[in-house]
Image (cartoon, helix red, strand yellow):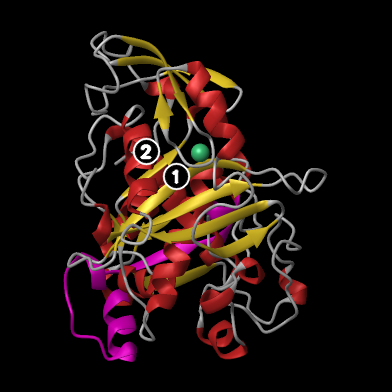
Amino acid sequence: MAPSDPASRAEPPTDRNVKHVVLGDLLFPTWYQSIYPEDLVSKDTDRLYVCRWCFRYSCDSHAYAQHTRLCQHRTTPPGTKVYDHGGYSVWELDGECHKLYAQNLSLFAKLFLDHKSVFFDVVSFLYYLLVFTDPKDPDNYYVLGFFSKEKLSWDANNLACILVFPPYQRKQLGKLLMGVSYKISSWERDSGLIGGPERPLSEMGRRSYTRFWEERIARYLLLQVGKTGEAEAPGSVPLKPKSPKNSKRKQTHELMTVQDIGLATGMLTEDVITALKGLGVVEPVTPAMRRKTRDSAGETGSGEETATVRIRKSKILEWAESHHMALQDPVRNEGFLGKWAPSASVEESDVDSDSEDG
Ligand SMILES: [Zn+2]
């Protein structure tokens, strides 16, 4: 799995069966081999025409043009809209109910993913399509990418495969999809499910996720930890440390365990550690201080996840500024619809409801 990125890719392998795709009115090169049936797509296809609404394909431009006039999905994506904010929406579809759609989407996605093994076992997956609808042109929509997720993941994976289609990359849309995947998994069970993407990650996937996790934790630490109860609308918090005069708390650092951060952000311990290292905001706590903290918290655990770390907010702010991180989470709670629509109780219990990254 990988949010792929042309900048970090080696030259595409020359043995790709399809060299270019036409998706709607966009023409762009493919990156990898897919497994389109050879009787329909020859081994040396220069242009494959792919419907931008249902991902049906044809080597024949005439047949393609004919299909696009009749495509059953030309006005609405399949499945159920679960998120809608700022022109971007996410549609959930069950691979079992939309088998052909899911297969065609997977075949198309494989052209841009170097290792993706699930193509025809689509029935055990859910698919989340990222859709953009221009408010000025509400009857038209564009599928920009998607992620898939196993319906039942023994490893608590909240995402199996993610792809933003090449023409739409470098617009932070991968973060939006990752944020939605974490949000949904955190709401799936009352207790909150700790999960992460399916491993192993590709090199590009690892880099994309590391940045996503860093921002997620930075937002959590800046916006949630040590809140004094003063009104703080998410997104309206300036990127400046609070004036000590105005704050009841004068401390400049927080003592926390990696486990606490993981529980609060719905992230695996190993991913929290990766992010904290990347942020460079953690200072080791002296043994005496650690003992004191543990005693007060009644903790007896040991090892990395129960290790107490000292986090300086000023350093997180520095990181956020130097990385041009928006404090506002691109995924908005109020954007979720239907079964995922936030209720008052969910908002109260969802520790990072405002600061979750995406
Ligand atoms: Zn179609």
Residue drawn at the location 52% of the way across and 66% of the way down: 220
Q: Position of residue 267 (x, y in %)?
A: 35, 65
Residue 177, image x, y percentages: 49, 52
Specify the quadrant of the image occupied by residue 21: top left
Residue 9: image location, x then y, percent: 35, 20
Position of 52 compared to 204: left or right?
Answer: right
- In this rendered view, identify the residue nearer to me: 290 or 59: 59
Q: Dot 2: within a 10 Å radius of its alpha carbon, few (fewer than 14), some, or many (20 or more) residues?
A: some
Which circle marks residue 42 in the picture? none
Q: Quadrant of residue 40?
A: top left
Q: Which residue is mark 1?
A: 211
The kind of residue tagged 1 is Arg
Is the residue under label 2 in contact with that under label 1 (CB below 8 Å)? yes
Residue occupying the point 56% across, 90% down:
345
| Helix, strand or loop status at disc 2 | helix
Q: Is residue 149 above or below residue 30?
A: below
| Span colored in magenta | 290-317
Q: Is residue 223 magenta?
A: no
Separation of marks 1 and 2 at Cα, in angstroms? 6 Å
Q: Tell me the residue that label 2 is attached to.
A: 207
User: Which amino acid lies under the numbered mark 2 shown in the image of this protein?
Assistant: Arg
In this view, the residue farthest toward the right is 136
Quick check: 38 left or right of 145? Answer: left
Mark 1 closeness class: few <14, some 14–19, many ≥20 residues within 10 Å: some
Visible residue check, residue 169: no
Q: Quadrant of residue 167?
A: top right
